[in-house]
Image: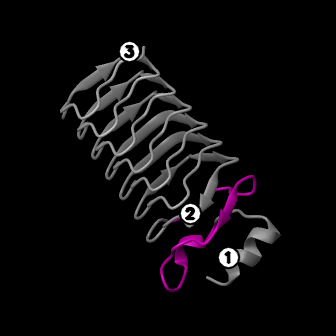
């Protein structure tokens, strides 16, 4: 609790059955780390490199991921609750059995991501980049969406579940 790992080089470290509360990982190097059965409460990962990281049965609640790099990260049976991931990069990330609840992904990059049995509740996806990410089966009806970056033919939208009002906003895409 309350530990500071700012700027630490922890590349490739495995974390198992840990509980971090109010810890700061800002600007740290956590690429290729694995997190198994880990709980993060109110932790700061701003501008942290978490590329190619692996997350299984993890819970992140009230965490800051602003500007974090999670390219190629894999999330399995995990949940993000009340997290801010503005400007975060999740390019080529995989989400399987994941819950995204009340999270802010404004101006985040979710390009070429894979979604499998992922649930979105009350999130914010404004000015989010979904280029080459299939949104088929994703339910955005409880979320705030708009200004998405998509491919020219907006093929990413096929099969996405949106409200009629959201559909009007996306129709211009």
Between label 1 and label 2, give the one nearer the viewer. 1
Q: Is residue 72 above or below residue 102?
A: below
Q: Which residue is mark 1?
A: 170
As drawn, the label of residue 145 is none
Q: Is residue 102 above or below residue 21?
A: below
As drawn, the label of residue 17 is 3
Q: Residue at x 64, y 65 (%)?
A: 160
Q: Earlier in the sequence, mark 1 or mark 3?
A: 3
Classified by dominant secondary structure, the portion drawn in magenta counts as loop
Q: Earlier in the sequence, mark 1 or mark 2?
A: 2
Q: Which residue is mark 2?
A: 135
Residue 67 point in image, percent of width and height? 40, 51
| Range of magenta residues | 134-159
Q: Earlier in the sequence, mark 2 or mark 3?
A: 3
**Is residue 137 at least partly visible in the picture?**
no
Q: Residue at x 35, y 18 (%)?
A: 3
């Amino acid at each position: 609790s309350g530990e500071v790992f700012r700027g630490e080089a922890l590349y490739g470290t495995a974390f198992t059955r840990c509980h971090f509360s109010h810890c700061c990982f800002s600007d740290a190097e956590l690429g290729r780390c694995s997190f198994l059965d880990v709980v993060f409460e109110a932790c700061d990962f701003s501008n942290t490199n978490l590329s190619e990281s692996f997350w299984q049965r993890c819970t992140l609640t009230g965490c800051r991921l602003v500007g974090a790099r999670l390219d190629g990260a894999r999330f399995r049976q995990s949940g993000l609750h009340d997290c801010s991931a503005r400007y975060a990069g999740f390019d080529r990330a995989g989400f399987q059995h994941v819950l995204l609840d009340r999270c802010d992904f404004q101006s985040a990059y979710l390009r070429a991501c894979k979604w499998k049995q992922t649930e979105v509740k009350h999130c914010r996806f404004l000015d989010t980049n979904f280029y080459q990410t299939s949104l088929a089966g994703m339910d955005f009806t409880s979320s705030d969406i708009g200004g998405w970056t998509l491919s020219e033919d907006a093929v990413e939208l096929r099969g996405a579940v949106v409200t009629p009002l959201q559909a009007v906003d996306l129709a211009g895409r």
